[in-house]
Image (tube, grey):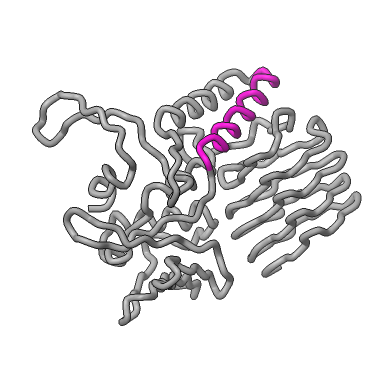
Amino acid sequence: MKEAGFGYARFRKGYFAKTSFFGEADFNSADFYSITFSKETTIHQTGDFSESIFHGKTTFRRVIFEGWTKFQNALFEEQEKTVFDVDKLSKVSFMNTDTTRVRFTERVNWTESQEPKIVDEILLEHSVFPLFTWESVPGNKKQESKLRNFLRNTFGLNWIKNNITLIKSPDGDTINITSNDKNILTLELKRNYGIVRVKHNDVALPAFVVKNEKSILRGNTLRVYSVSEIRVGSVQSIYRNLRENYEYRMRYDEAGKFFIREMELKRKFREVSSPDAPYKLKYNNWFRCWCTGCNCIIIYQGTVNQYFGLLFQE
């Protein structure tokens, strides 16, 4: 299916088997009664089960979540009868959803790296730290690599690899990313709206935010961020739910890793109130002074944009 719109639908004692969703799989606010997703059913780009209610036995077996999939504000009424027997949940969000008794089998992998960093924390970071500066792509290899990784890991665009071609339009407002197999991703800068529209083969993906910010070396520059309304406390709550879940199943090693991530997140970020940026964060950390090669410790508690503008983008 290119796109599937099942919002507010009701599914009774059925199953999806070997079904591929190539566009958006929209199950927002749907009701599922004893449903099974199985046999390599694949969500290639984005999936939305937000505010859905799962009644009775619910099974996700060998489902492939290649793109960002949301189970946000969802309800699993019978968690002991809810099973996720899949290889990867590294692109799945359970924000504001109780998963403390959901069964996650041992094959589940929450991350594509060694750290158990869930997708919500990754999106939080990219909404605080810029993905790239518009003027530097294409051209800056480091920023191109960061953008490729984000598009591939978040939206499941596995064709975006090192051999892709990035071309900017003559007016500087469009970046086309293409491959040999005729896939195309378009980033279109809308300066008046402060966004970058994203389309994959004419299918709209979540837009980026663009901000005109001051750079120490370049003056004003356009920095591009992912769109995220995620609060630090919400991400901590997900880690807390997962820790409780794994402790209940007596999987203490994995539970300990989720506890470490929760504490690490708390150490790094704290929310501050701001009239123009309700999700603005401060970064609590110490940095070793590498400028002079000494071993002194610098304690800094300024805002992210004040301190990290140069470090992350120049």
Relative to the observer, which residue lies in front, 110 or 61?
110
| Residue 179 seen in the figure | no
Image point (11%, 27%), residue name: 294
Occupied quadrant, residue 268:
top left
The part of the chain drawn in magenta is: 231-250
Q: Residue furthest left?
A: 292
Name above or below for residue 73 compared with residue 203. Answer: above
Image point (41%, 60%), residue name: 161
Name above or below for residue 14 compared with residue 55. Answer: below
Q: Is residue 238 magenta?
A: yes
Q: Position of residue 154 (x, y in %)?
A: 52, 53
Residue 30 relative to residue 183: left or right: right
Q: Position of residue 230 (x, y in %)?
A: 53, 45
Residue 301 relative to residue 12: left or right: left
Relative to the observer, which residue lies in front, 40 or 34?
34
Relative to the observer, which residue lies in front, 164 or 127?
127
